[in-house]
Amino acid sequence: MANKDFKPLDFSKVRTYPAEKRYSKVQTAALGKIVQKGSSVHSFIDGLPDILAAQNLKAIARKIAQTHAANRTVLLGMGAHPIKVGLSPLIIDFMEKGIIDAVALNGAGVIHDFELAFMGETSEDVAASLEDGSFGMAEETGAFINQAITDGASKELGIGAAVGQAIVKARLAHRRLSILATAARLGIPVTAHIAIGTDIIHMHPKADGKALGEGSLRDFRTLTSVVATLGDGVYLNFGSAVILPEVFLKAVSLARNLRQPVQKLTTVNLDFLAHYRPLTNVVDRPTMGNGKGYHLTGHMEIMVPLLFAAVLDDL
């Protein structure tokens, strides 16, 4: 078989065009501004490059501020991590300002919120206590939360409301740090969504499967009622990789099934890793058609204060 005859191309005939006629994604107006000593928060945020994540951060902050000003719903869904990295005071402040209208937690979020309210500290060293079986066996945590959930079930309360009201009623020493207690005090919806066996309180003798199931189902229906008001609103998912993205997607579908106009929705996932479920169930699927989904990657203890500062600056 004969070798193919590859003829060299005449590269002198390559076609070019003037660079100035080309569209360029990075332009002078989008470049960052030098940070000056003593700069205000406004100057710092305004000086961020108007590119990629910084551009998204500004757009998200602007949308949250516009949503609040228009009296539309801003719903925060979160895992326990925002509490564990010290963000409760910031979230509580936005609840008190009326910027965050409702909160949804997973089961771990309830636990860490209670422990902060009870003793002003939380997050045990799992590795150190797992070997001897003492992990998760703090008496007050399991007893208080389980009792609150059981009492709440008898009053037809969801888990979020039941534990929040119990913290307020018990006048726990650090209740000002509790998102659940703040919601109870302000009368705004707070829900908890559990998977039995995932949380340390399920190991406690007081755990009542019937009350846990009833309370979490009631909270799912409450959350769906909040999601039904998210037309032209904002859903924030902070650090929940599985539970809240799954629950949120079902709530969106159920609300739409009940003919609620959950359209023009803006969703935001913020976490230090990009996970499949938040990207799919929060950012992409619920916003298809006429919504907008964002993902911000970074440490929450830095990104959330920066986002909240930008929101306040826009307001």
Image (cartoon, grey):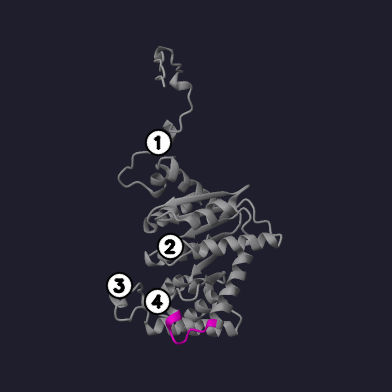
Given this view, does label 4 or label 3 mark the residue nearer the observer? Answer: 3
Q: CA distance from mark 2 to mark 1?
A: 30 Å
- Identified at 44% across, 42% down, the residue is 52
- Looking at the image, which is closer to me, 131 or 76? 131
| Amino acid type of the residue that numbered disc 1 sits on in the rendered structure | Leu
Q: CA distance from mark 3 to mark 2?
A: 29 Å
Specify the label residue 115 is tagged with: 4
Task: Specify whether residue 28 is painted magenta.
Answer: no
* Rendered location of residue 54, percent (x, y): 43, 45
Residue with the most extreme left position: 128
| Amino acid type of the residue that numbered disc 4 sits on in the rendered structure | Glu
Pointers 2 and 1 in contact (C-beta within 8 Å): no
Specify the label residue 90 is tagged with: 2
- Identified at 43% across, 13% down, the residue is 13
* Rendered location of residue 33, percent (x, y): 37, 38
* Rendered location of residue 174, percent (x, y): 40, 76
First in sequence: mark 3 vs mark 2 = 2
Given this view, does label 1 or label 3 mark the residue nearer the observer? Answer: 3
Left or right: residue 201 versus residue 247 is left
The magenta stretch is 202-209
Mark 2 crowdedness (10 Å alpha carbons): few <14, some 14-19, many ≥20: some
| Amino acid type of the residue that numbered disc 3 sits on in the rendered structure | Ala
Q: Is residue 194 above or below residue 237?
A: below
**Displayed quadrant of residue 200:** bottom left
* Rendered location of residue 228, percent (x, y): 64, 61
| Amino acid type of the residue that numbered disc 2 sits on in the rendered structure | Leu
Q: CA distance from mark 1 to mark 3?
A: 46 Å
Q: CA distance from mark 4 to mark 3?
A: 19 Å
Quickly name the residue at label 1. Answer: 31
Q: Is residue 101 visible?
A: no
Quickly name the residue at label 3. Answer: 127
Q: CA distance from mark 4 to mark 2?
A: 18 Å
